[in-house]
Image (cartoon, rainbow, N blue to C red):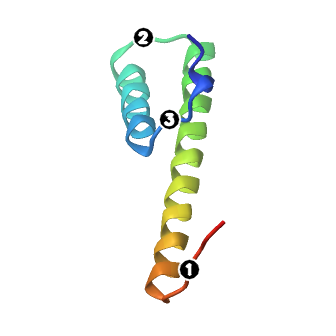
Amino acid sequence: MEEKQKELSLEERMQKMEDIIRRMENMELTLDESFRLYKDGMEQLKKCSEMIDTVEKELQIIEEGGNDNE
């Protein structure tokens, strides 16, 4: 099943990053494998940051008493 079929939650992405780190620390990897894992980890980090930014913006709107009905 392809992973891109559903959007991963923040928690799922963070777990994926932990798994990537664990694999990079505990396994003997080729340069290509290490680079692939690094790229995947950076993509997960970017998505996590975007998700957190979105939540922060929504909280700011709520705190300011605004209503964001999109």
Q: Quadrant of the N terminus?
A: top right
Helix, strand or loop at label 1? It is loop
Outermost residue, bottom direction?
Answer: 64
Marks 3 and 1, the one that precedes in the sequence? 3
Label 2 vs label 1, nearer the camera: 1
- Label 2 and label 3: CA atoms lie apart by 28 Å
Location of residue 51 in the rendering, given as x and y in whole percent from the top left corner: 53, 54
- Label 2 and label 1: CA atoms lie apart by 52 Å
Question: Which residue carries the number 2 mark?
Answer: 28
The residue under the point 63% across, 14% down is 32
Taking depth in this image into account, of 69 and 9 the one nearest to the observer is 69
Question: Which residue carries the number 3 mark?
Answer: 8
Q: Quadrant of residue 38?
A: top right
Marks 2 and 3, the one that precedes in the sequence? 3
Location of residue 61 in the rendering, given as x and y in whole percent from the top left corner: 53, 80
Label 3 vs label 1, nearer the camera: 1
Taking depth in this image into account, of 45 and 25 the one nearest to the observer is 45
Helix, strand or loop at label 3? It is loop
Q: Are marks 2 and 3 in contact (CB under 8 Å)?
A: no
Location of residue 35 in the rendering, given as x and y in whole percent from the top left corner: 61, 24
Helix, strand or loop at label 2? It is loop
In this rendering, would 59 be left or right of 66?
Answer: left
Label 3 environment density (alpha carbons within 10 Å; few <14, some 14–19, many ≥20): some
Location of residue 55 in the rendering, given as x and y in whole percent from the top left corner: 49, 64
Query: Residue 67 — which label?
Result: 1
- Label 3 and label 1: CA atoms lie apart by 26 Å
Label 1 environment density (alpha carbons within 10 Å; few <14, some 14–19, many ≥20): few
Marks 2 and 1, the one that precedes in the sequence? 2
Amino acid type at image mark 2 = Glu
